[in-house]
Amino acid sequence: RQHLLAWHQAEDPAASAAAYQAAFIERLAGWQPKMDEWRAAYQQAIAANKPLPDRPSFVSGKDRFFAEVWLSSKGPLAIEDTETERFTAAEVEEIGRLKKELDALKKTMPTEPEMACAVEDGEQVQQRVFIRGDYHNTGEDAPRSVPTILAPRTTAVSFGKGSGRLELASWVASPVNPLTARVMANRLWLWHFGEGIVRTPDNFGKMGERPTHPELLDWLAQEFVASGWSIKAMHRLIMLSNTYRMSTAISAEAERIDPENRLFSRFPRRRLTVEELRDSLLAIDGTIDLAMGGSLQKGTGTDGENDNKRLSLNPESVTRRSVYVPLRRANLPTLLNLFDFGDATALTGKRQLTNIATQALFWMNSSFVTTRSANLAKQLREAAISNEDRVATAYWRILNRPATPGETAQAVSFITHFTAHQPAADALAAWQSLCRVLMASNEFIYLD
């Protein structure tokens, strides 16, 4: 250690030790008041429920001898848990008692409350225009307000103290601002029909498409506001409408007048989203975990963000509903990407829709589908009912409808021929194959 060189080279060790001690005492005298001041501020912050002050830091390079002796956990003044020869028997007993008390307090501590990143208003700043983007070259005042292009001409938005976030949020969710309600009503419609009344849900501007039914969109927006901005009420309103309850069948006249179904002359056939497909498969065999709340993510904070404990979970390996499966934007599972999950790094009002061979291969080869079909087949085999009733149960569980007489006869014939032509196969494998066929059918995958 370079800072001990004077000691090693000293002709008078006692004098050198005294010099080290004098320098140490002088440094400690300047350091201790800082620590006392911090401790007092720390206690005051706790009592007032305010942010805790940072502990004073000491740059080791200023005085390495002091840093190693006084501040280091490996210094000569540090006390290890196994080091008791420095204390009397009574002190050792007292230390043991205090440790037990500390352990008991830790066991009875309430769980740490869940935390979230948030913002709070600071000192108000009067912003000015930066000429050519240079903050050193300021121009006229830029008072806080809603952008003129968005705010109605007849509505003046008053900004008080603080940053103005509260006033802006109040204006965004205000009945006098029709844009928010119209955008939300359009997206609710899109989630049910696959297409919105405005086909460009992320663009209501000049470059976006015009609404196909502007009066309907305005009426839905008014109902949304009148219901107290209730999304549940809007779901109920849309799903009870005649438009939602129409069939996907198309008449010759509708095909001639409305070939692209822009007028919603029929229900647009829609493939279920990947979340709907996954949760439906789990519900079919009864393995879905309907527990509400909680998290499947291990680890806390951001320091371990790149740790394996903070990666996305594989949705094929857990049974919780998809809404509770934690995802990491840069590490989306294969299943989600396969079935057109939204871009997790950007706002996406409408997902892209693809129809590729690997999606069909998933239904044929996925271990997730294999497990679901095997579970359902086992339940059908264990039921003390006829094969015809087993087929009826399978259709109800998977396709949510009764099997027709022809489908029942075909399914029973399939089971019989499967076991007859494959001597090594048992009845369970035959029923599993039938369940898998139904799960891979378009009738299950698409909302018709």
Image: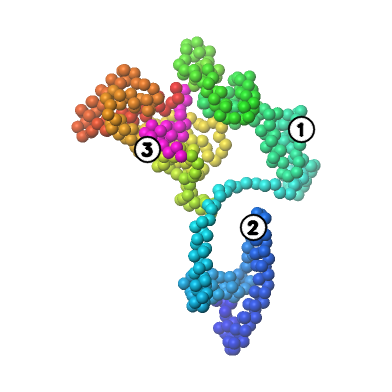
Q: Amino acid at mark 3?
A: Phe
Q: Residue at x 67, y 59 (%)?
A: 44
**Residue on which the image places disc 2:** 46
Label 1 secondary element: loop
Give the alpha-carbon distance from disc 3 to disc 2, as whole Å.
51 Å
**Residue on which the image places disc 3:** 368
- Name the spot of residue 423 as percent of width and height, x first: 19, 32
Quarter of the picture holding the N terminus: bottom right
Q: Amino acid at mark 1?
A: Ala
Give the magenta-colored segment's residue range: 269-291
Q: Amino acid at mark 2?
A: Ile
Q: Residue at x 67, y 55 (%)?
A: 48
Q: Residues within 10 Å of mark 2 (few under 14, many from 20)?
A: few
Q: Residues within 10 Å of mark 1 (few under 14, many from 20)?
A: few
Q: Residue at x 27, y 33 (%)?
A: 428
The extreme right residue here reads: 140
Q: Residue at x 49, y 38 (%)?
A: 323
Position above or below: 110 against 398: below
**Residue on which the image places disc 1:** 156
- Name the spot of residue 243 as percent of width and height, x first: 53, 18
Nearer mark to the viewer, of 3 and 2: 2
Label 2 secondary element: helix
The first of marks 2 and 1 along the sequence is 2
Q: Any magenta on residue 289?
A: yes
